[in-house]
Image: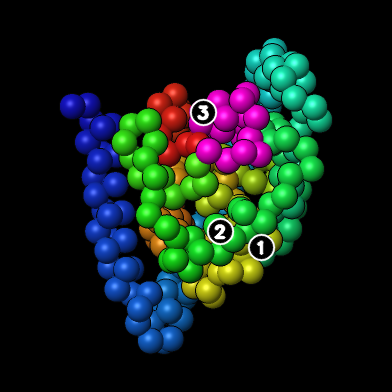
Amino acid sequence: MTYETRVFRRDIAAMEKYSAALDNYTNAEQFGKAGLASKTSHAIFRRSRFDRILKRSTDILASLAVLGLGFPFFLAIALLIKLTSKGPVFFKQERIGENGGGFALFKFRTMRIDCDDSLHREFTRNFIQGRQPEPSLDAGKNRVYKITDDPRITAVGGFLRKTSLDELPQFINILRGEMTIVGPRPPLPYEYECYDEWHKLRLKVRPGLTGLWQVSGRSTVTFHEMVMMDIYYIENWSMLLDLKIMLKTVPVMLAGTGGR
């Protein structure tokens, strides 16, 4: 086992231990949740100016590299989308970002145009409130807390979602400063409306393209677990942790774990 593997496993073990503590914490009285908010805010405050500049510089350089070197690959995906379904190549969607602010998120279109989102709205509300149905299984026999066999998704869109390639245009959002490479995923407005106040702690930082949730199961974890992972990330952030998550993201994408 390499040194990097040992360190990453140690971090994941620490996160799991912290998550177990938070599981009890979120059932505590209101003063307990206020204490969690204070702890999270303090973790953000103690980040140095150098840390912030380094993280932003990494975002800019990586985005320029991906958008520049990956242009032929982007073009191939765009061609596949246009040849297999009607509608635009890109999909622009309102999301909630840092401290509850809104922005337009870019993705490759994976759905048919003019689709009804009522099914997703209902699923999301139940998922956040812990009333989701029994999870289905993905190809690797992992639990998936996500709508499966969604009739709105195109054939090419299904592949793009499984491998997360539909998310690549978000490097534009990263370059614009609306997102970062590693951070909590930005929710939809109607998801955000279902949040308890303590859930909103995950958006005390800039939202990310990938994060602990993505490398720890994606849609194979519950909403509660996802929030705990995001809070753990905020309170334990470092550039080294960001690097580990980025390196872990590629094999997760290739395996398609939890992606539907």
SS label for mark 3: helix
Residue at image location 44% in from the left, 30% down from the top? 256
Across and down, in percent, residue 200 comes to 55, 67
Q: Is residue 161 magenta?
A: yes
Picture quarter with the N terminus = top left
* Earlier sequence position, callout 3 versus callout 2: 2
The residue to which callout 2 is attached is: 124
In the rendered image of this protein, does residue 257 appear above or below residue 132?
Answer: above
* Mark 3 vs 2: CB contact within 8 A: no
SS label for mark 1: helix
Out of 148 and 164, give the one closest to the viewer. 148
Across and down, in percent, residue 234 comes to 46, 57
Across and down, in percent, residue 69 comes to 66, 16
Quadrant in the rendering for residue 230: bottom left
The dot on residue 234 is none
Quadrant in the rendering for residue 236: bottom left
Query: CA gap, disc 1 to disc 3?
Result: 25 Å
Q: Amino acid at mark 3?
A: Thr
The residue to which callout 3 is attached is: 163
Q: Is residue 26 magenta?
A: no
Q: Amino acid at mark 2?
A: Thr
Question: So how many labels did they put on this image?
Answer: 3
In the rendered image of this protein, does residue 8 appear above or below residue 31?
Answer: above
* Mark 2 vs 1: CB contact within 8 A: yes
SS label for mark 2: helix
Query: CA gap, disc 2 to disc 1?
Result: 9 Å
The residue to which callout 1 is attached is: 190
* Earlier sequence position, callout 2 versus callout 1: 2
